[in-house]
Amino acid sequence: MRKKTFAAAALLAAASFTLSACGSDDAGKSPVSVVGETGPAKAGTVLDQPFKKPDLVLTDTHGKKYDLRAETKGHPTLIYFGYTHCPDICPTTMSNIAVAKKSLPQAEQNDLRVVFVTTDPARDTPAELGKWLKGIDPQFIGLTGDFAAVKAGARSVGIAIEPTKKDKNGKLVSVHGTQVVAFSPKTNAGYVLYGEDTTVDDYTKDLPKIVKGETP
């Protein structure tokens, strides 16, 4: 992976313009994490100004309150905003991470927090999230709650999302940024972004460093 840096402020400014609607005609647009890149696209973008972890208190798949900052403090953490009814990008992204995670030693697998925050809380109930994530990796954490709070949390890390709406075919879609944000266990800051084209091999290569808070 090319070691590349981008200012967090630039990503925040770009967030409003780079969205993907999973399964819709808008799918396939570049995620925020690669805005402004030159040369061949690479798996990750290392930020020179890391993001603070979103200040979110939502509901987990057991129906219990989950304080994102408190629960993940000191743990390597990957955060993704998406929804369970997505037919393509969201399940592919989460499955790629799940496969790559298995290459880590068991202790590191247990330490890693992979958090999926729904952008479609009206349909993604705790039970729905739990059922969906169990089929990918039972250790993954699913969070749902007030859409305004989710939107603000996503925005704080440069990810723009919009309320679920019907596309031109009458299908409900959730339009959202498609990057994964990696947070260091040392600083609890988000310092690496991964786009929707990141492969299993990319995650397999980078996760051993992410779990240690090192720069991949």
Image (cartoon, rainbow, N blue to C red):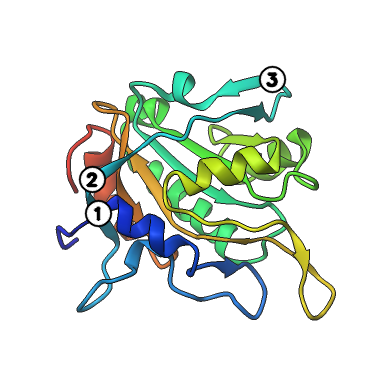
Q: CA distance from mark 3 to mark 1?
A: 35 Å
Is residue 195 at all visible to an observer of this figure?
Answer: no
Q: Is residue 96 left or right of residue 81?
A: left
Give the number of the disc on residue 49: 2
Q: Amino acid at mark 2?
A: Gln
The disc labelled 1 sits on which kind of residue? Ala
Is tag 2's residue or tag 3's residue first in the polypeptide sequence? 2
Which comes before the other along the chain, label 1 or label 2? 1
**Which mark's residue is nearer the viewer, 3 or 1?**
1
Q: Which residue is mark 3?
A: 64
Q: Secondary structure at mark 2?
A: strand
Which label is found at residue 7? 1
Which residue occupies the foreground of this view, 100 or 156? 156
Q: Is residue 13 left or right of residue 67?
A: left
Outermost residue to the left: 3
Q: The residue tagged with tag 1: helix, strand or loop?
A: loop
